[in-house]
Amino acid sequence: MNRKATALDVAKKAGVSRSAVSLVLNGRGDGNVAKESQDRIRQAALELNYSPNAIALSLRNQRSRVIGILSDEVVVSPFDGNIIGGADDVARARGFVTVVMDTERDAARDASAIETLLDRQVDGLMYVTVGLKPIEIPHGMLRVPSVLANCYDDQPQPQLHHVIPDEVTGGREATEHLLELGHQDIALLAGSEDSPAAPLRVQGYRDAHAAAGISVRNDRIFMAGWDIDAGFGGAMKLLDGVSPVERPTAIMCANDRLAVGVTLAAARLGLRVPEDLSVMGYDDETRIADTMVPSLTTMALPLREIGRAAMTTLLDAIEGTGEAGSGTPVETMVPCRLVVRESTGPVPTR
Amino acid sequence: MNRKATALDVAKKAGVSRSAVSLVLNGRGDGNVAKESQDRIRQAALELNYSPNAIALSLRNQRSRVIGILSDEVVVSPFDGNIIGGADDVARARGFVTVVMDTERDAARDASAIETLLDRQVDGLMYVTVGLKPIEIPHGMLRVPSVLANCYDDQPQPQLHHVIPDEVTGGREATEHLLELGHQDIALLAGSEDSPAAPLRVQGYRDAHAAAGISVRNDRIFMAGWDIDAGFGGAMKLLDGVSPVERPTAIMCANDRLAVGVTLAAARLGLRVPEDLSVMGYDDETRIADTMVPSLTTMALPLREIGRAAMTTLLDAIEGTGEAGSGTPVETMVPCRLVVRESTGPVPTR
DNA sequence: TTGAAAGCGTTACCAG
DNA sequence: CTGGTAACGCTTTCAA
């Protein structure tokens, strides 16, 4: 735990001044420092394993090349971590580092986390949520370039750029996939109203039906919840004791966990997936959708892309590459991606 | 984006010197600064919403009250995030802040992340993994007090304290639960050798059988993997086309996802859980074990406790509360916790 | 009781 | 081409 070498140590060893060290090591040696001194400086730096103290640098430059990522519960929850992964990819590629703080859905901690981050001179802030949701911009976030990922400012006059998935199109394309397979009676387990994603996906479902000229039966749409038991319960209601002609031939779910519950119910009832019933998921949850039996056809949430897009916007604003940052806040919608696996198939002949 | 107030601003507003501000705001005003000035200072600080610049503070004090949490993939994966949650609980309670960096299993990024953190004067480091595993201590981690959570240094002479779950006892108690329900023929889907947790849980399974005087059939133990499809496949092998007397009456799984696959297979085969077959999970994965149908009896991994214990050890070392930090590295084992739900029941009479 | 000054490690400016 | 000096914001010591 011995102290690290400082610029002064390097200067001494090379027999020059601190300023010379600074210039050379920052690539502005030519034209300012004698070639020979430059070599000695570089040599000394190498031998002493010198790297500038980031703290001193931040204090001096008033910027840190650190982006603070704040999340409501991405770290502790099983969901949406790849948004942060994608954001970090971009940040590292552009010479920034990210640090993550999770406030575990305690709004009171948001402000204090931001305060902490701001006190450490982060150059920018990104707020990431688990699941699409409106948020109140935490106090302090406007003091520095910021962006919202997977969430948005619900105010009439939004203050921050946000990046979200295109849920309506996602819902529509999922439905279209089923429609194209010949299904006409498609039930929808739509999650619950507590998430703004639910109504959007329902909207997509309705749009697809409308485009196909098929009228939607409202009793085919269930707002049951998001978990396995909700999927199970919903499917039982739709299938148990119902004659084959009365049954929906496909059940579209607002997430993969619901689809697990539906598949479980189908198995209980002796229905084969997809021969007797097609099941469609949403999210493409890692190691759920791809490992289910049968593997789930699903609408993949573009998590990494969301993170990437959000970070790109943020860094552009910070570095002034585009004027997007200081301009009017905008919305970026990233398309979802249909992943066809085994749980959907042609409509059964009956 | 206007500049934050500094101690100088406060001093001016209160009509005193910077030093006075510093003294008062750090609680050493009494005996040094006139009561009346103190009030004015505090008032001014409040009005200006002053908080000291953490960067300057770190530079000055050579410590930051920040703990760096490094993880192989906790942030991006769906697992084990609560270790970080628990660690953060303790850190905040003791006046520290945690920042998380995820290297997404890229060992090359470990060292650079640590370098970054060290350059920012973190007072301590914690390494957290998804799933129990041996790790090579990343370079630089020994330069500052550090601790390992959910992983351990595999060297003959371990250098760091680590906190891990007690997997052998977990495996034993899970098995005992089944034994107590009368099961004598308990199959085990044991995950795979790529995780050190697997053999430990198997060991517990064997220990419980030995203590009960029941011999273990090695053909009842499958190292199939960790995912839903592996659970499904394993269960089919054990159950499909096998006469009731030849079937195991319980299947114990090394994680909850395997148990989902087993339950799915049972449903396909018309077997009721738990009446015909008891299914036991492991991990108590949020919103899987508790929402399965039937809900899963499982052995809960003590994630938050691991995080808490690790952070406590680390902060004790940093603050010199105990001499544990500088002493010989030790191992802390945290017990798992049996959670009885609906998927296990008495052995069926046949 | 107060204020001035030094120092933490940098970089940028400006005389020499 | 070079090196001294100021400044970033803070705490602490020392002298008034």
Image (spheres, coloured by chain):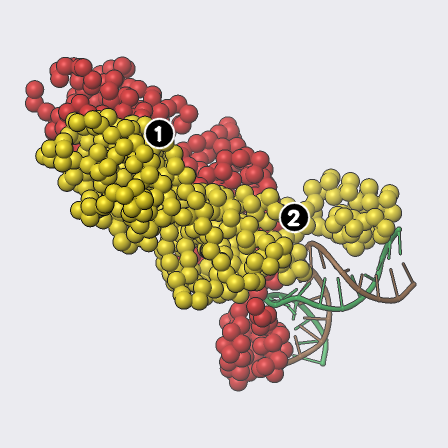
Chain colours: A red, B yellow, C green, D brown
In three-dimensional space, the C-alpha distance between marks 2 and 1, rounded to whole angstroms, equals 56 Å
In the rendered image, residue B239, in percent from the top left (x then y), is placed at 15, 36
Looking at the image, residue A323 lies above or below residue A164? below
Horizontally, is A268 left or right of C7 in the view? Answer: left
In the rendered image, residue B316, in percent from the top left (x then y), is placed at 59, 54
- Between B18 and A287, the one nearer to me in the picture: A287
Residue visible at 86% across and 44% down in the picture:
B35
Q: Which mark is residue B3?
A: 2
Residue A191 position by quadrant: top left
Determine if marks 2 and 1 fall on one subunit.
yes
Horizontally, is A295 left or right of A190 in the view? Answer: left
Disc 1 crowd rating (10 Å Cα; few below 14, some 14-19, many 20+) is some
Horizontally, is B186 left or right of A118 in the view? Answer: left
Residue visible at 57% across and 47% down in the picture:
B91
- Between A295 and B350, the one nearer to me in the picture: B350
Label 1 marks a residue whose chain is: B
Looking at the image, residue B263 lies above or below residue A34? above
**Count of number-bearing discs:** 2
Q: Which mark is residue B341?
A: 1
In the rendered image, residue B39, in percent from the top left (x then y), is placed at 82, 41
